[in-house]
Image (cartoon, coloured by chain):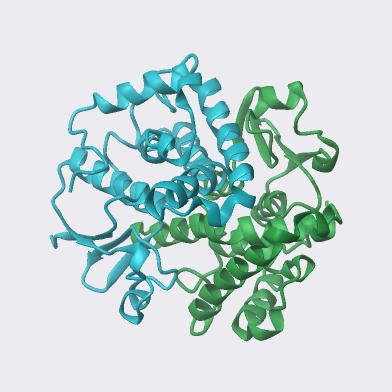
Chain colours: A green, B cyan
């Protein structure tokens, strides 16, 4: 089998999802770092690989690409313990993956990007308040769900946890106060104690 | 088997995705209309069904709920001609479903909501320009992809087409000019000619 190639940006939570899963599955991969703040995902060469100009991008074999972090998680976790086989449990994993990309990441990840990666929150002040409100709404949904559960689906660690963990555990870097969410904090510690856990800074 | 129950809002593209697929599969369902502009998805009763307070919501059997339009599409299309069986084709369907929820719907659907459903674009003028720019970026990715293809994945009509069609074919209601995208326009006509097609206004 070809070695998987991951186009990535180390501070990216979306990239981290894939690094974390591949490490926990124990699947070797080559990481290619692209600095998204320097336009390295907007070059003609990269756009020929992913016309949407975003990392992470997985090169499954030469010339065969897959984009979208959560689609990559689903592709890689097929047949592993990280994706349930049961039809309804699997549907619930999908539900949380789409929640993450539509109700969570657009507010929590982008706040962190503006504040801690670009370092220019003042340029976007008119939208920061709305991002915080919507991000906190997503965190409340998560807190409520985790109040009587250990993990998001089926009481087992799955890619739903990986997808939601990526930006939640660094939400403070986007101006979110997690101390008011005890169930989320306990879940973050449970995720960190999983076998094969790596931090977002580890290559 | 229990009759499926769909919590829905007729003008919603996300709700329309499910109505369209269920009609094309030929699966009967009961539709429950909730007016999202009147807070009907924010009542304690509805929040007990979907804590994220959004339609569409599918009640698979009494008390068993599934949220997120694209998760519902995947759940319902399993084993049908609308979802490929091949692992990489299926991954590409997932890729487009996440693209839709992260790079398309937040800009194209929300512009339509503010202009044509709420009728209050002036309240959000500072964000309308950014929505238009990002929505046009998504439409360009679609136009490029469709320039030498009939459908999004595997040259067959799948739930990737349903998900992207829902808000694209009414993008003009959000201030987008589709006349500059001939491949998208031709694809819209191909989707409209599929067996069992219903419009977004049909219950």
Query: Is residue A81 something that shows in the picture?
Result: no
Could you say which is closer to the camera, residue B124 or residue B45?
B124
* Residue A98, image x, y percentages: 49, 55
How many marks can you see?
0
Q: Is residue A67 left or right of residue B78?
A: right
Q: Is residue A176 left or right of residue B70?
A: right
Position of the N terminus of chain A, as image quadrant, is: top right
Q: What residue is at 35 percent from the left and 63 percent from the top? A: B36
Residue A3 position by quadrant? top right
Could you say which is closer to the camera, residue A12 or residue A58?
A12
Could you say which is closer to the camera, residue A79 or residue B121?
B121
Query: Is residue B165 something that shows in the picture?
Result: yes
Q: What residue is at 54 percent from the left and 57 percent from the top? A: B123
* Residue A171, image x, y percentages: 72, 68
Residue B39 position by quadrant? bottom left
Q: Is residue B53 left or right of residue B2?
A: right
Q: What residue is at 79 percent from the left and 45 percent from the top? A: A9
Residue found at the far top of this picture: B148
Against B36, is B179 above or below? above
* Residue B145, image x, y percentages: 52, 23
Q: What residue is at 42 percent from the left and 24 percent from the top? A: B154
């Amino acid at each position: 089998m070809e070695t998987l190639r991951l186009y990535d940006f180390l501070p990216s939570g979306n990239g981290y999802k894939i690094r974390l899963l591949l490490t926990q599955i124990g699947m070797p991969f080559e990481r290619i770092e692209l600095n998204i703040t320097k336009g390295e995902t907007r070059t003609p060469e990269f756009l020929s690989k992913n016309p949407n100009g975003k990392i992470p991008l997985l090169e499954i074999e030469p010339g065969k690409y897959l984009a979208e972090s959560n689609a990559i998680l689903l592709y890689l976790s097929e047949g592993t313990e990280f994706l349930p086989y049961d039809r309804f449990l699997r549907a619930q994993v999908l539900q949380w993956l789409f929640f993450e990309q539509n109700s969570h990441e657009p507010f929590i990840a982008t706040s962190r990007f503006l504040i801690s990666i670009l370092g220019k929150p003042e340029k976007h002040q008119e939208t920061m308040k709305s991002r915080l409100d919507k991000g906190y709404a997503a965190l409340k949904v998560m807190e409520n769900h985790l109040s009587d559960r250990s993990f998001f689906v089926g009481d087992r660690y799955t890619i739903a946890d990986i997808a939601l963990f990526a930006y939640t555990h660094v939400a403070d870097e986007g101006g979110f106060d997690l101390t008011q969410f005890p169930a989320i904090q306990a879940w973050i510690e449970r995720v960190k104690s999983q076998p094969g856990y790596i931090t977002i800074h580890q290559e």
